[in-house]
Amino acid sequence: MLIIKLNATDSTNSYLKRLCGNELVTDYTAVMAKKQTNGRGQMGTVWSAQSAKNLTFSVYKDVSTYNLEHPFYISMATALALIKTLKSLSINKLSVKWPNDILSENKKICGILIENVVKQNKFASSIIGIGLNVNQVEFENLPQASSLRVVSGRVFDIDEVAQIIIKNLKYYFDMLKKDEFETLKNKYESCLFRKNKPSTFKDAEGVMFSGFIKGVSNSGCLQILLEDDIIKEFEFKTITLLY
Ligand code: BTN
């Protein structure tokens, strides 16, 4: 397994994407950078992380032989691999804030940006970008962010954490390969942040509404039980969970 270590790049996702097609890049080839000058988050946001203190990396996954109907299963497998990794490091109170932010003690410690390549109407490969706050202790202006060090009081070896994540990505992608979709979805749903708790959301027009998170659909929609006792499915980007 190849891990390419860089001092700096624009974005490890972009770097790995540019490298795709090169014979160096095989399943689980990873790129790590101490610094990103154009780190990208979900929905076109910027991902900035304190250099060298955090894990900023991307993993190439070939899914061309997988029986994948929905790319959301790639997100689920990735989120679960992170939860398994953090549990093994004795990080407590973990949850997945839909679709794939990883929280500890209700604060975000990890963001995931997955970029899929589709060839001939099939998912061919994925670039799995992971930004994990590891040893950073100051989060100025980011009250909802935290790190492994803040929640545990311990300092972590970033390379070791990366190796464990890759091992656990293999574990969950092997499940996907064996079409164990139901098991994967059940596990993912059991980790959902605020599941079955009264919660408040905001829709795309800024209108607030209340409901209970019940689960996810196969395509990755969030299922919310609304006040009129109806479960409605919401697509990613159409709602925000406020509290
Ligand atoms: C998010 O929560 O918005 C997703 C953040 C993903 C950040 C990681 S850092 C490594 C990889 N390279 C990028 O440019 N983004 C992802």
Image: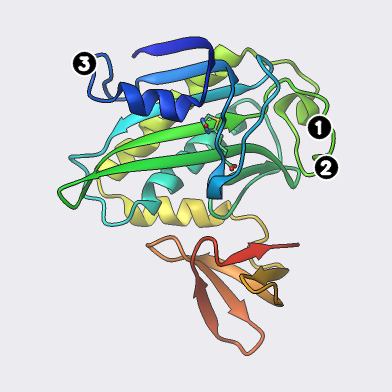
Image quarter (top left, top right, bottom left or bottom right) of the C terminus: bottom right
Residue placed under numbered mark 1 in the picture: 139
CA separation in Å, label 2 and label 3: 43 Å
User: Which quadrant does the N terminus fall into?
Assistant: top left
The image's colouring method is: rainbow
Location of residue 212 in the rendering, given as x and y in whole percent from the top left corner: 65, 72
Using a 10 Å C-alpha cutoff, classify the residue at mark 3 as few (fewer than 14 neighbours), some (14 to 19) or many (20 or more). Answer: few
Q: Earlier in the sequence, mark 2 or mark 3?
A: 3
Q: CA distance from mark 1 to mark 2?
A: 7 Å
Q: Position of residue 148 (x, y in %)?
A: 71, 27
Where residue 144 sits in the image (x, y, percent)?
A: 78, 44
Disc 2 under 8 Å from ligand 1? The reply is: no
Q: Is residue 110 visible?
A: yes
**Tag 1–tag 2 contact (CB < 8 Å):** yes
Q: Is residue 217 left or right of residue 47?
A: left
Quarter of the image holding residue 169? top left
Q: Secondary structure at mark 1?
A: loop
Answer above or below: position of 126 versus 214.
Answer: above
Quadrant of the image where one finds ligand 1: top right
What residue lies at 44% left-to-right and 60% top-to-bottom? 220
Q: Which residue is mark 2?
A: 143
Position of residue 19 in the picture relative to residue 40 (left or right): left
Amino acid at dot 3 = Glu
Q: Are marks 1 and 3 in contact (CB under 8 Å)?
A: no
Residue 23 bears which disc, if any?
A: 3
Q: How many marks?
A: 3
Q: Is mark 1 within 8 Å of ligand 1?
A: no
Examine the image and state in which quarter residue 198 appears: bottom right
N-terminal label among 1 and 3: 3
For the residue marked with disc 2, what is the amino acid? Pro
